[in-house]
Amino acid sequence: MREAEIALIGEITAGVTHEFKNVLATIRETSGLMGDLLALSREASFPHREKFAKILTTINKQVTRGKEISGRLNKFAHSLNEPESRVELNALLDQLAFLVQCLASLKPVQLTIHPIEPPIFVHTNPFRFQLILVACLEYCKECTDGARRITLQSRKTGKGIAVRIVIEAGSISIKKPCALPCELSDIQEATHDLGIQLLLISTPGQHGLELILPLSAG
Amino acid sequence: MKMEKLRVLLVDDEEEFVNTLAERLQLRNIIPLVATDGNEALRIIDAERPPVVVMDVMMPGMGGLAVLRQVKNSYPKIQVILLTGQGSTQDGIKGMRIGAFDYLMKPVRIEGLIQKMNEAFQASKQNEDKTGTTRP
């Protein structure tokens, strides 16, 4: 039942983003037509011409922004309907970083991705993997007195594909946890199901979490 | 020598979008034809044989891919450009397999769309030259 609910949410969200895309397309064409007519009447006197041109530029910029937001949300919605698939890790992390920056709780945090080169594909449940990552990010933000910068680094290790979520707190003090905290207990079942190992990093230079996806799944 | 004007059929169930796009193309010396569903599109294609069709993939009733299939069966020279949603690249890829000229993500920039329409127009003319047939 839970899976059916998630699939339905994914389907509805994908449908809504499609409609949103139609709204944006109509706004772009309508403002484009206004710009065309403005350009045609270049010789004629037209009050507020410059102001109109500036407004049209703003509309166009916001349509581009809306297009990216709806596109990312659409991709995320489609990921809800994919139980397990082959996903490119850099693209997935980039997608996630964009979406979590829309979450109020993570808005003040600047997320930076250090992509793995060459890009690698992992076989996982993209939706559940993203849920795990969001929980990890929330935890990393909470375990400092206000982390402002978190980086996501991935690399291939002997054990598997490691995704490291590192807090770059600068002068901010770290509330050092000595064991995996209970806030993360909710996702431990999910990590177990996906064969992902969750580790705590707490060294003088680096604090954060590490997820290791098994090599067999990579 | 007089340049042949490009005739293009625009197919989209979003009336305001498709009519505004048609108006903008007209301002750029392109002759637009408009259909707001798949059946209407097929009727116009039968009657007008436009060399290029720009069509949304997701439409109620007969969707863009179903129309594309029929167009390519009956009029293989007609070039079809599909408009897809972001994140729905699978539809675009499916369309290319059926024989679409290309696919673009909505909302499109008019300059990019016109460039693609001109490329499709050239391709349709080349196909005509190869088959030795003439346009209606």
Image (cartoon, coloured by chain):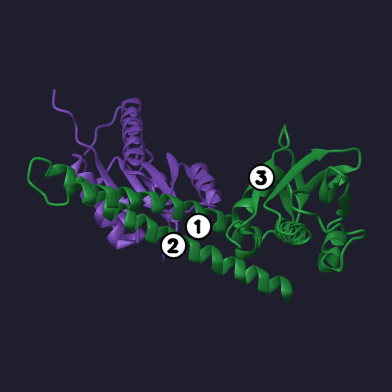
Q: Which chain is green?
A: A
| Left or right placement of residue B124 versus residue A139 in this view | left
Q: Chain of mark 2?
A: A
Q: Which chain is purple?
A: B
Q: Which residue is mark 3?
A: A112
The answer to whether tags 2 and 3 share a subunit is yes
Closer to us: B123 or A7: A7
Q: Secondary structure at mark 3?
A: strand
Q: Residues within 10 Å of mark 1 (few under 14, many from 20)?
A: many
Q: Which residue is mark 2?
A: A20
Closer to us: A109 or A99: A109
Q: Residue A48 appears at what percent x and percent y?
A: 17, 51
> Residue B64 has which mark?
none
The reply to whether discs 2 and 1 touch (Cβ–Cβ < 8 Å) is yes
Q: Which residue is mark 1?
A: A70
| Left or right placement of residue A120 versus residue A33 in this view | right
Separation of disc 2 and disc 3 at Cα?
A: 28 Å
Q: Amino acid at mark 2?
A: Phe
